[in-house]
Image (tube, rainbow, N blue to C red):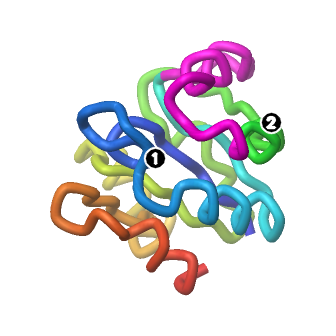
Amino acid sequence: MNIYLDINETLLKKDGTPAIGIVEFLKYITDNHSVYWLTTHCRNGDNSYVLEYLQDKLPAESNDFLKKIIPTKWDTLKTSGIDFSQDFRWFDDYVMESERQVLKENNCEEKHILIDLKNNPKQLLSVIELI
């Protein structure tokens, strides 16, 4: 299965610190799935900026897992970076209405996993069981 990841308020809390369980989450998804960045920090097919951005924000033990994550190319809508021909889950704290419509048109609305670290700080640990 393909996993698509946002960063801010998905892997990092609003204050920029790592979400609880970030290393376990990254290890699990990169060991068991094809994982792609779907974030404004990586939208041109080059992941060098996102790796630099996260370098001092995440624990050092997450670096090997981060390097396994594949960059995507997309423009206005993140959904243009999703391969709808493959099963996937998209982890993001927010989806625009136009992106939600694309998910609906592709019968994939349930594949977006809304991340809410403010109200569920351990959510990354619990979603491991969903995938």
Provide residue 92's location: percent of width, then percent of height: 40, 51
Left or right placement of residue 116 versus residue 124 in this view: left
Q: Residue furthest front?
A: 60
Residue at the location (31% across, 50% down)? Answer: 93
Q: Residue furthest bottom?
A: 129
Numbered label attached to residue 87: none
Tell me the element at label 1: loop
Provide residue 8's location: percent of width, then percent of height: 38, 36
Residue at the location (64% across, 14% down)? Answer: 49
Residue at the location (77% across, 47% down)? Answer: 65
Q: Are marks 2 and 1 in contact (CB under 8 Å)?
A: no
Q: Earlier in the sequence, mark 2 or mark 1?
A: 1
Residue at the location (34% across, 31% down)? Answer: 16
Query: Badge 1: few (under 14), some or many (20 or more) residues near its Cα, within 10 Å?
Result: many
Provide residue 37's location: percent of width, then percent of height: 62, 38
Numbered label attached to residue 11: 1
Residue assigned mark 2: 67
- In space, the residues marked 2 and 1 are separated at their CA atoms by 15 Å
Inspect the image, locate mark 1, and give the three-letter code of the amino acid beneath it: Leu
Provide residue 70's location: percent of width, then percent of height: 77, 38
Inspect the image, locate mark 2, and give the three-letter code of the amino acid beneath it: Lys
| Position of the N terminus by quadrant | bottom right
Look at the image and say whether residue 130 sits in the magenta stretch.
no
Left or right placement of residue 60 versus residue 59 in this view: right
The residue nearer to you, when weighing 89 against 48, is 48
Q: Reply above or below: 28 against 126.
A: above
Magenta extent: 41-62
Tell me the element at label 2: loop
Quarter where residue 119 is shown: bottom left
Q: Residue furthest left?
A: 119
Query: Badge 2: few (under 14), some or many (20 or more) residues near its Cα, within 10 Å?
Result: some
Q: Reply above or below: 131 against 33.
A: below
